[in-house]
RNA sequence: GCCCGAGUGGCGGAAUUGGUAGACGCGAUGGACUCAAAAUCCAUUGUCCGUUAAACGACGUGCCGGUUCGAGCCCGGCCCCGGGCACCA
């Protein structure tokens, strides 16, 4: 029987599905392990060979953990709400639910061919009402909660109401609260709720007709579609993520994530410890205190002007009558610019004098107040003190508008640029003179606080998440407007299902739900916005723990068993989006006692991208003649992408190329050595570059086991690397060779003979390697170790059960189909999935001799064999004894013997 | 501009973290089998020098320098590539 991967793979895929082999129960005595993939958005293009990389890695880990005796939860689902399906609906009129269901079916069939050990009984889809009921439920909880700084946790809003009505809270006295109208009470509570409605400057994307969160915008363009984004003041639902800034930051320390990813989150949270200082200002005779934020109070003696953000609400009050015209014109101009323009023009300095003056609280000096877009309204207080000598932005501004530059650090040269470094000795700075900068920062902070001029303040760059989208294909808000007051829908009304509509495009500035019929609750209008994409993906990992529970997001027992995700695999592109929102969402549910862990993802692995390898042909300018890569320097050519299916080993199939496109049917070729050699480059895998490789095709030609092994063999998981179908023959050959240890055509070769020490050594080496490498996600070297072991065993013609049976178990996480087939051929009734690994580890530990190479001054001389348990001293003794007998040592005297345990011995001689 | 990560054969990448650099695979070259092809198997494959040849020796991990018996790995200074953030005071 030859290795026929097609029949083997379909046979066992059917068997696993029929027997629910991968179904997992929360009711187990075994230790649990939760392995999760970031669930995909089912796009119309289907999967390419890069998508399953992370899934294969996590599947291997899940299978490996099962072999080690863990009860493994390894689920899969779909992030099924989202913009592309809706954009498609707008173009074609097809309902997003229909196209989404088609795409899900396509994804499922592609995934099934690769042989994953997902427990599909727990599948979730975010667009399923039974699922989004819990997204809406969490929103209601956030609407019904506030962040209590005393408890440093979210609490039910009722506790705040109690506080307000008895003692008052912050600016609101109990009298004021009790006398307030319903509308006023709603407004007060709104400024404390975790999910709240507020008017802020938002990222408005005209092209998509909706607002976007900060992480959905890059370089002033929407990530989906690349449309320009502008800043607009709008009333929107928001999540008070900023209340969790400190916890999101400190929580990172306990997580096993890569440093680079943690660093990205730290930067995004952007903690900055500084000081708020009050400057009195004067404008047309009026006095107004203005608070500024700075991280460098020590430079306060170098302040030569102040700057306000154009959007700051202080601008009208701090504009003198005679400057009003210029200021209005400037503010109007700034507002007109798109976000992208403001970003690309950061080098050009703009600004206008307000006509007002501030008083430096330390020197009493009178300084001008300017307005400039380089100060942001949304950060700090929207006002700064400018120290041009020691801040490059202030410096550029001062130079442009000819404002004084006052150096306050001894010996610094500010003639050409500012001196931003936090080092040196202070001067021109009153009581700070002579201090080191670091010392001065603390001294100045203390001084400002003692004199009552300001206080220490920590700021974060992390903003609240804008949570409304003016779109159709998302979760409806469980909110209705009772006499204009936003009111929570009763929990018993959930899920609030998405109404049917016919036309999906937003019209007249109204979201699509405005056109839904009877979109009301008890006669009151329901909220017309929908939730953003990240709503459904923020807590899906809880749902898998208990996916059929219709009474809770997750039942207490299931939650206490599975707790949190032990291993999460996905791309870095979610670093500042999904991975922040999920942590926030999780911490919120934790505060209210609905879940038992406050961090969702213990360990995180970021798989790299698999890039495409594109091929090119070179057309000689103005002709239809193509020149081979090696000869193209002699001609003026244009590089043209050619479909990689027409190319093998970079050699073009000329006839297939002619047939590819009508315009090439009469193409002529200049060959080298009788062949047309194509150029190549590593690029993103995309249809337009004709370099997409579909996993279905690989499964057809080589089988899923080969695909799995090859994707892992390609290189380290976390690294981006190009797909190159050429190399796949190597791993395919490996599987065929493996098969031939069991079968010679129809002859069954496996015997019960006792294994030789050499055979056992090969096996034990592999077990050791696999143990070590899988836990470190170094799968490429594990695959190599398999190949080495197989080469050794093949040479020994080893077809012994004692060796092959553990080998099948070891291989099963990587190549489950062939392993399952051979496992049953070895006479086992149960799936290899239920085989257990540990008994073979004992054998590995027993095999313990080490070969040491012995070098003299770094030169290899001889080897000695020592037991693994030998101490360095014992090893040294053996070497010295050996050295005395070796006659070539001659007159040399031994200075010392260096023993590296398990590795090498170097004898230093003179 | 700031913060991460990396640089090793023709290619993807190994190197047990300071211990025989180039494992494993691809590609390439030669050979066996075959009428032929596919498949399979065997050998060679970092560079250079020398001898008919081998053994052997020299050089070699982006560049320059340092520490060490020993450096791809550690330290100092550059050069390039990839990623993230970007007027955050």
Image (cartoon, grey):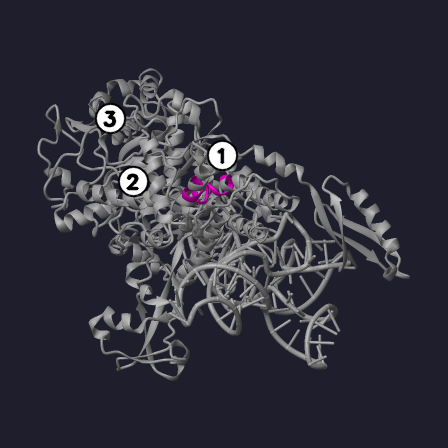
- The vertical placement of A59 against A781, above or below, is above
Q: Quadrant of residue A754?
A: top right
Q: Nearer the viewer, mark 3 or mark 2?
A: 2
State the image coordinates of residue A238 (x, y, percent, origin top left). Answer: 29, 36
Q: Toward the viewer: A98 or A201? A: A98
Which residue corresponds to mark 1?
A67
Residue A788 sits inside the magenta stretch: no
State the image coordinates of residue A840 (x, y, percent, origin top left). Answer: 58, 36
Which residue corresponds to mark 3?
A186
Q: Reading the chain from its start, which is encountered first: label 3 or label 2?
A: 2
Residue A171 visible (yes or no): no
Q: Main secondary structure of the magenta part?
A: helix
CA–CA distance between discs 1 and 2? 30 Å
Which residue corresponds to mark 2?
A79
CA–CA distance between discs 3 and 2? 34 Å
Q: Nearer the viewer, mark 1 or mark 2?
A: 1
Secondary structure of the residue carrying tag 2 is: loop
**Pointers 1 and 2 in contact (C-beta within 8 Å):** no
Q: Which residues are magenta?
A: A809-820
- The vertical placement of A30 against A310, above or below, is above
Q: Are there few (<14), some (14-19), or many (20+) residues within 10 Å of tag 1?
A: many
CA–CA distance between discs 3 and 1? 56 Å
Q: Toward the viewer: A847 or A376? A: A847
Q: Chain of mark 2?
A: A
State the image coordinates of residue A794 (x, y, percent, origin top left). Answer: 55, 52
Q: Chain of mark 3?
A: A
Q: Are there few (<14), some (14-19), or many (20+) residues within 10 Å of tag 3?
A: some
């Amino acid at each position: 029987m030859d290795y026929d991967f097609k029949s083997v793979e379909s046979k066992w895929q059917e068997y696993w599905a029929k027997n629910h082999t991968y179904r997992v129960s929360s009711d187990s005595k075994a230790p649990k392990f939760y392995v999760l993939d970031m669930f995909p958005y089912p796009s119309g293009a289907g999967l390419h060979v890069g998508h399953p990389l992370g899934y294969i890695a996590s599947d291997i880990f899940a299978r490996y953990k099962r072999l080690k005796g863990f009860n493994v939860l390894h689920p899969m689902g779909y992030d099924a709400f989202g913009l592309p399906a809706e954009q498609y609906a707008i173009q074609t009129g097809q309902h997003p639910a229909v196209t989404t269901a088609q795409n899900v079916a396509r994804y499922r069939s592609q995934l099934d061919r690769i042989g994953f050990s997902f427990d599909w009984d727990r599948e979730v889809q975010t667009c399923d009402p039974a699922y989004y009921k819990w997204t809406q439920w969490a929103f209601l909880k956030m609407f019904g909660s506030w962040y209590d700084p005393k408890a440093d946790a979210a609490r039910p809003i009722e506790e705040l109401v109690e506080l307000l009505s008895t003692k008052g809270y912050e600016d609101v006295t109990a009298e004021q609260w009790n006398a307030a109208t319903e509308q006023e009470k709603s407004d007060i509570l709104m400024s404390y709720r975790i999910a709240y409605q507020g008017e802020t400057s938002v990222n408005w994307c005209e092209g998509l007709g909706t607002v976007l969160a900060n992480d959905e915008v890059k370089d002033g363009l929407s990530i989906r579609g690349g449309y320009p984004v502008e800043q607009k003041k709008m009333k929107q639902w928001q999540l008070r993520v900023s209340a969790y800034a400190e916890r999101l930051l400190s929580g990172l320390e306990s997580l096993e994530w890569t440093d680079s990813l943690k660093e990205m989150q730290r930067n995004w949270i952007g903690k900055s410890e500084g000081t708020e200082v009050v400057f009195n200002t004067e404008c047309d005779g009026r006095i107004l205190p203005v608070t500024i934020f700075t991280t460098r109070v020590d430079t306060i003696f170098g302040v030569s002007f102040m700057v306000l953000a154009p959007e700051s609400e202080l601008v009208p009050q701090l504009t003198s009558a005679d400057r009003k015209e210029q200021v209005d014109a400037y503010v109007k101009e700034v507002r007109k610019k798109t976000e992208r323009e403001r970003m690309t023009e950061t080098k050009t300095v703009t600004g206008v004098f307000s006509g007002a003056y501030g008083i430096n609280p330390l020197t009493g000096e009178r300084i001008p107040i300017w307005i400039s877009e380089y100060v942001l309204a949304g950060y700090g207080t929207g006002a700064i003190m400018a120290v041009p000598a020691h801040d490059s932005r202030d410096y550029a501004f001062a130079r442009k508008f000819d404002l004084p530059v006052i150096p306050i650090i001894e010996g610094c040269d500010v003639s050409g640029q500012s001196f931003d470094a936090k080092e040196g000795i202070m001067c021109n700075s009153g009581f700070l003179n002579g201090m080191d900068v670091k010392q001065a920062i603390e001294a100045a902070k203390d001084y400002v606080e003692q004199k009552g001029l300001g206080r220490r303040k920590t700021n974060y760059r992390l903003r609240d998440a804008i949570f409304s989208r003016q779109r159709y294909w998302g979760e409806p808000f469980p909110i209705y407007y009772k006499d204009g007051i936003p009111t929570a829908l009763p929990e018993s009304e959930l899920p609030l299902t998405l109404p049917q509509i016919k036309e999906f495009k937003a019209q007249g500035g109204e979201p699509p739900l405005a056109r839904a019929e009877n979109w009301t609750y008890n006669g009151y209008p329901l909220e017309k916005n929908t939730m953003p994409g990240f709503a459904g993906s923020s807590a899906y990992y809880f749902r898998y723990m208990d996916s059929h529970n219709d009474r809770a997001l997750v039942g207490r027992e299931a939650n206490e068993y599975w707790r949190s995700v032990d291993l999460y695999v996905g791309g870095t592109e979610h670093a500042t989006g999904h991975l922040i929102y999920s942590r926030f969402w999780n911490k919120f549910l934790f505060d209210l006692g609905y879940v038992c862990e406050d961090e969702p993802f213990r360990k995180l692995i970021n798989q790299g991208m698999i890039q495409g390898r594109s091929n090119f042909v070179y057309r000689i300018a103005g002709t239809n003649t193509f020149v081979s890569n090696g000869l193209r320097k002699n001609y003026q050519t244009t590089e043209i992408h050619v479909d990689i299916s027409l190319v093998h080993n970079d050699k073009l199939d000329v006839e297939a190329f002619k047939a590819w496109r009508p315009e090439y049917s009469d193409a002529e070729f200049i060959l080298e050595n009788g062949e047309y050699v194509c150029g190549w480059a590593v690029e993103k895998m995309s249809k337009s570059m004709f370099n997409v490789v579909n996993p279905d095709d690989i499964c057809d030609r080589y089988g899923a086991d080969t695909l799995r092994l090859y994707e892992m063999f390609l290189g380290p998981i976390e690294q981006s690397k190009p797909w190159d179908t050429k190399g796949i023959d190597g791993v395919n050959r490996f599987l065929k060779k493996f098969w031939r240890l069991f079968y010679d055509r129809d002859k069954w070769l496996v015997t019960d003979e006792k294994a030789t020490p050499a055979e056992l050594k090969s096996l034990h080496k592999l077990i050791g390697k696999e143990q070590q490498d899988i836990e470190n996600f170094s799968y490429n070297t594990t695959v190599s170790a398999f190949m080495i072991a197989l080469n050794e065993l093949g040479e020994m013609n080893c077809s012994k059960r004692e060796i092959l049976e553990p080998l099948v178990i070891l291989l099963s996480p990587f190549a489950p189909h062939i392993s399952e087939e051979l496992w049953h051929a070895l006479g086992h009734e149960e799936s290899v999935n239920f085989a257990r690994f540990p008994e073979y580890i004992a054998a590995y530990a027993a095999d313990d001799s080490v070969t040491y190479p012995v070098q003299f001054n770094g030169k290899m001389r001889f080897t000695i064999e020592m037991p693994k348990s030998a101490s360095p001293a014992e090893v040294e003794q053996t070497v010295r004894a050996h050295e005395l007998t070796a006659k070539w040592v001659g007159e040399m005297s031994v200075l010392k013997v260096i023993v590296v345990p398990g590795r090498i011995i170097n004898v230093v001689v003179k």
